[in-house]
Image: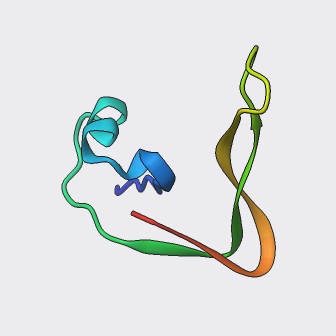
Amino acid sequence: MSEYYFAFGSNMDEVRIKKRITKFSERFGGKLKDMELVFNKKAYGKERIGYANIMAKLGSKVEGI
């Protein structure tokens, strides 16, 4: 059984991926159709800081690996 992890933004860094997923056999690019990259996750205790997230939006796409 295969399992896939879609990474976008700073999570595309190979070192970061290896910390989160200890074993993977390959990396390749991909796109999520009808999705949009947004920065709507507020940082706890930090004003005006937001983290990346993806949300549905027709006609948009998010590129990642």
63 w.r.t. 19: above or below: below
Residue 20 in which image quadrant = top left
24 over 59 or under it: above or below: above
Residue 50: give x, y in percent of width and height.
71, 38
Of residue 24 and residue 44, the one placed in the foreground of this image is: 44
Q: In which quadrant is the C terminus drawn?
A: bottom left
Query: Viewed as shown, does residue 65 lie left or right of 45?
Result: left
As drawn, the residue found furthest toward the left would be 25
Place of residue 30 in the rendered image (x, y in percent of width and height, measured from the top left)? 44, 73
Which residue is painted at 31% across and 30% down in the image?
19
Expressed as whole percent of the image width and height from the top left, the position of residue 44 reads: 74, 18
- Answer with the quarter of the image where residue 62 lies: bottom right
Which residue is painted at 26% across and 46% down in the image?
14
**Which residue appears at 49% of the width and 56% of the height?**
8
User: Is 36 rendered above or below residue 5?
Assistant: below
- In this view of the protein, which residue sits in the foreground, 29 or 49? 49
- Quadrant of image for the N terminus: bottom left
The residue positioned 43% from the left and 46% from the top of the image is 11
